Amino acid sequence: MPSKKTKKSKIHVSVEELPSTSSSEKKTKKAKTKYSNFYITLNTNLRLKKTDAARVTAKRNFLAGFKKVLTDIGDHIEFLGNGSWDDVDKADVKIRPEIGPKKKLIHGHALVRIKHRTKLRIPYAKLRKAFENAGAVPEGGKYHMKVIVANDNMAHIEDYINKNYRK
């Protein structure tokens, strides 16, 4: 006798196991890529005449110290939480020293761009101390340092720091 098909034989039931909730089996979520941009200005407030021999020395010291600190910017970055250099994809530094056209002050600008997947910061006090230790600013003198955390639209900042440089 042929078997008779019933409604129950047409129903297909698929049962899956519930996912495990143990912490050792949880999948880790990949951190979102972030971009941090820091615009740094360091002004020595040194107003020296072109003919002044101290200007040559001050300019040389500033250039060497400014470049050293910013070339070694990785030494001045602090990671928050569990962050480390493994979470940094790329770091780019553009350095532009100059002598102001009006007041002839020796100063410089830098743009630091970091592509990362963690939380990080550049502590201002630590950076300021690094510029002092590198001889970028006059010993015991007053100088001005400004660090701005900038957004992704960096075109206007790049235009400004490139104003005296030919492309």
Image: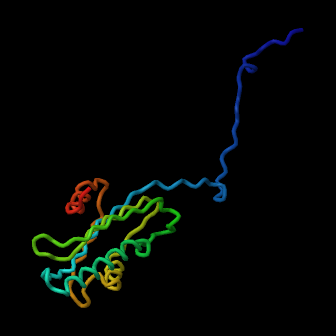
Q: Is residue 135 above or below residue 93?
A: below
In the rendered image, which quarter contains the N terminus?
top right
Between 135 and 39, the residue placed more toward the observer is: 135
In the rendered image, which quarter contains the C terminus?
bottom left
Horizontal and vertical percent position of residue 3: 84, 12
Q: Quadrant of residue 127?
A: bottom left
Horizontal and vertical percent position of residue 98: 22, 71
Q: Is residue 104 above or below residue 52?
A: above
Task: Name the residue: 17% across, 82% down.
Answer: 46
Between 33 and 157, the residue placed more toward the observer is: 157
Horizontal and vertical percent position of residue 29: 54, 53
Q: Is residue 157 above or below residue 95?
A: above
Between 74 and 2, the residue placed more toward the observer is: 74
Q: Looking at the image, which residue sits at the far right?
A: 1
Q: Quadrant of residue 100?
A: bottom left
In this picture the colour scheme is rainbow
Task: Name the residue: 76% across, 20% down.
Answer: 9
Task: Name the residue: 31% across, 54% down.
Answer: 152
Number of callouts: 0
Q: Looking at the image, which residue sits at the far top?
A: 1
Horizontal and vertical percent position of residue 86: 53, 64
Q: Quadrant of residue 141?
A: bottom left
Q: Looking at the image, which residue sits at the far left?
A: 102
Horizontal side of residue 35 vs 104, given as left or right: right
